Structures are given as C-alpha cells and as structure tokens.
Image (cartoon, grey):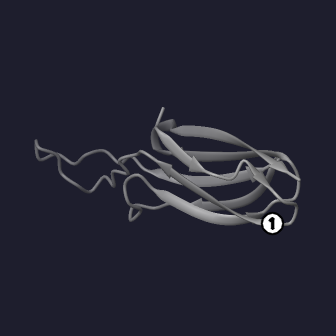
Amino acid sequence: MARTLITAPATAKRGEVIELRTLIAHPMETGFRPGADGLLLPRNLITRFSCRYNGDLVFSADLHAATAANPYIAFFTVATESGTLSFSWEGDHGFAQTETVSLSVT
C-alpha cells in the first residue's frame, strides 16, 4: 500500500468551489532506465487517477511515462451535498489504491 496525502476541506458551503490536492508515493518507473546491473528496470507506473463525489465522477486523468515520481494532482469541484470523496489510483502489475475523505456541506 502506497503512502498518500490528501488535502480537502472537512466542511464547505453549498455551491462553494473547493480545491482538492493529492499526492501518492510511487516510483513511476518507465521501464527504459537501466538498473545497477545494466538490465532495464521493469515498468511500474500509475496509469489512471480518478475522484468520485458521492459516486459521481468529478475528475480523472490518464498518467503516462513522463509523469514524475510521487505524482501530485490538484483540481477543483463544487460542494453540492455532504458525502464522500473517493480518490483512486490504478497502475501496472495490478496496483490499485483508494482513499476516502468525508465532506460536510452546510
């Protein structure tokens, strides 16, 4: 399980634009770089990120080999109702991780 950091407000007013920021610790190895033994290191990338707000997709991104290690993603959405924000990362070798944050809307 990779280490994640998610910054999201715990509360917001209905209709307020909120900023969501995520960071995940991941090497993002391209498969093109040689290791100490001269052999290519196997590809190990996060290939997709998505965020769902009460089950509805609000943001997604396809990530590629040019993405830096420990990818940081920031985006905005509108607070419409109290509920759960679900952040998901998917990648090579069956990598999948999901984290959730609660949002209270007044």
Using residue 21 as the reference point, say whether residue 34 is left or right of it: left
In this view, the residue in front, 52 or 22, is 22
Q: Mark 1 Cα within 10 Å, few/some/many (few <14, many 20+)?
A: few
Residue occupying the point 52% across, 45% down: 5
Count the marks: how many? 1
Residue occupying the point 22% across, 48% down: 40
What kind of element bears circle 1? loop
**Is residue 91 positioned above or below 1 on the image?**
below
Residue occupying the point 57% across, 47% down: 89
The residue furthest left is: 37
Quarter of the image for residue 84 reads top right
Residue occupying the point 31% across, 52% down: 31
**What amino acid is at disc 1?**
Glu
Check disc 1 and report the residue beneath it.
16
Q: Position of residue 27 (x, y in %)?
A: 35, 47
Q: Position of residue 67 (x, y in %)?
A: 41, 62
Using residue 81 as the reference point, say whether residue 58 is left or right of it: left
In this view, the residue in front, 68 or 6, is 6
Quarter of the image for residue 102 reads top right
Using residue 83 as the reference point, say whether residue 59 is left or right of it: left
In this view, the residue in front, 64 or 56, is 56
Q: Position of residue 61 (x, y in %)?
A: 60, 62
